[in-house]
Amino acid sequence: MTFDERARAMGYAPQDPDFYKKHKDYHKKILLACFVWIVVGAIFSRMVIMAMYERHNTEMDLITKKNNDILVDARNNAMKYGSVKERAEAMQKKWDAEKMFDKR
């Protein structure tokens, strides 16, 4: 059984030998469509990535500002209340004073 006989037996229409003459060269259209798809997809991907980057950058700037405010407050408190060692010594003096007061 030949290819044409098998195709006819399966119910397919016979092949048109002048198909490319009638439909011209559609390969160029497909190639152009693929190229446009790639370019548009790349532009869209870049836009999405940049939008996500800007959002992340904004969030990180806010977190950095918050952390810097905490750091400035901690430094101001350190200057106001002294160092950890000085505070520990003051606390130890209070503790010793309370112990002596409790023994009486």
Image (tube, helix red, strand yellow):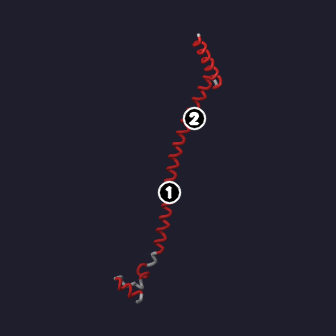
Picture disc at residue 45: 1
Q: Which label number is shown at residue 53?
A: none
| Quarter in which the N terminus is drawn | bottom left
N-term mark: 2 or 1? 1
Is residue 52 shown above or below 93?
A: below
Residue farthest to the front, as pictured: 103
Residue at the image position 52 percent from the left and 51 percent from the top = 50
Q: Quick one: 7 or 89, which is closer to the camera?
A: 89
Numbered disc in front, either 2 or 1? 2
> What residue occupies the far bottom of the structure in this picture?
1
Instruction: Residue type at mark 2: give it.
Output: Asn
Query: How many neighbours does mark 1 have within 10 angstroms: few (below 14), some (14-19), or many (20 or more)?
Result: few
The residue that mark 2 highlights is: 68
Q: Split into 4 quadrants, where in the image is the C terminus?
A: top right
Above or below residue 97? Residue 72 is below
Q: Provide the secondary structure element on which disc 1 rests.
A: helix
Circle count = 2
The spot of residue 66 in percent (x, y) is 54, 35
| Res 96 quadrant in image | top right
Percent x, y for residue 52?
Answer: 50, 49
Residue at horizontal 58%, vertical 15%?
98
Q: Secondary structure at mark 2?
A: helix
Residue 89: image location, x then y, percent? 64, 21
Q: Position of residue 97 (x, y in %)?
A: 61, 14
Amino acid at the residue labelled 1 = Ser
| Label 2 – label 1 distance at C-alpha | 34 Å
Residue nearer the viewer, 94 or 35: 94
Residue at 46 percent across and 71 percent down: it is 30
Please tell me whether residue 44 is drawn above or below residue 82 in the rendered image. below
The answer to which of 64 and 91 lies nearer the viewer is 91
Residue most toward the top?
A: 104
